Amino acid sequence: MSTRRRIVAYTMHEHEHAAAKAGLSGSAGDQDGPIVTDSMLIGYADQATVDTLKQQGVVVRELGVATPLPGPAIGRVPVPITAPLAQGAYVVVKLTEPLCDPHQDYLQQCGMTVQERLGNRSYLGRVDVAGAVGRLQALPFVESVTEYDTAVSLRPSGRIEVELEQDPQPGLAAAATKLRTFDVLVHEAARRPEVEDELKRLGIQVIGTGARKLRVHAGEQEIEQINGMDAVAFVDEFVQPKLYNDHVRGVILAAFANPSPLTGAGER
């Protein structure tokens, strides 16, 4: 008996889509259908079926030997979910295959809410239940689960430094303190006020806010404090954009009073 492998079938045309849907089976056996989207299907097939699909123009990517998903019905996680944690942790889950609705349902049942795609089949999410990481690692389509690590992006060119006009924190010498401008990205918009209140408590100057972003003036020590906040996803040094319209004006001869011999005189 030929080994069934889990594959992703990418289709462009209706006949390719129909052929892939007919040739693939789901996780619990031939009676179940594959995961179906508009442009791809994920399921199991033997080598003969894979060869046939390729001959019909279907692009096939093999994921490996068939490993059953937790069950044909969404949400059949064997380990019961316990009480919510006091503080949710943010993790990065890397998958072995593209994320589809059934995968997202399984992740949700394990206690993770997917928030955003990070690239390379990696997704950022928040886990709010004890033992969620272990259940996530046990899912057959999960390659790895790692703790999200915030990072500070420092940009030496175009740096903006400002003088403190008044001492925001007792013990700081205002006249000698140089601040730089940073954008602070928060994991969730609902937690931005929480971060803003904490920044104000620390005496860090907030100069602008958005749905998930705060722009601050801060020094190196303050940035380390911001970076350590659980709700903060990323800290990026702000660089003032440079405008190059003067260069464009020269290219299109707009800098001259009369760049063209056509003046429009006598025209109506």
Image (spheres, rainbow, N blue to C red):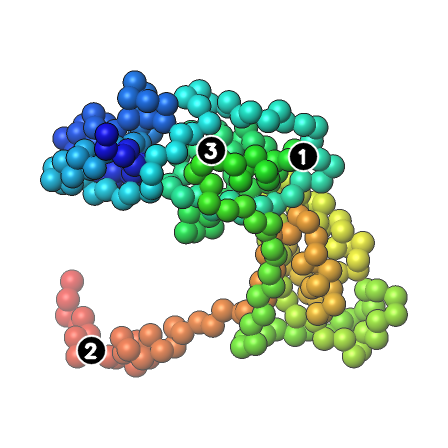
Left or right position of 228 against 60: right
Q: Position of residue 189 (x, y in %)?
A: 61, 43
Front residue of 1 and 90: 1
Tag 1: amino acid: Ala
Tag 3: amino acid: Gln
Cα separation, mark 1 vs mark 2, equals 73 Å
User: Disc 3 vs disc 2: Cβ atoms closer than 8 Å?
Assistant: no
Rate crowding at label 2 as few (under 14), some (14 to 19) or many (20 or more) other CA atoms within 10 Å: few
Q: Position of residue 34 (x, y in %)?
A: 31, 27
Give residue 153's quadrant in the image: bottom right
Name the disc covering residue 130, or none: 1
Q: Residue furthest front?
A: 1
Q: Quadrant of the C terminus?
A: bottom left
Q: Secondary structure at mark 3?
A: helix
Residue identifier under label 2: 260
Residue identifier under label 3: 104
Left or right position of 2 against 77: left
Cα separation, mark 3 vs mark 1, equals 19 Å
Q: Is residue 196 above or below residue 78?
A: below
Q: Residue at x 40, y 43 (%)?
A: 96
Cα separation, mark 3 vs mark 2, equals 61 Å
User: Disc 1 vs disc 2: Cβ atoms closer than 8 Å?
Assistant: no
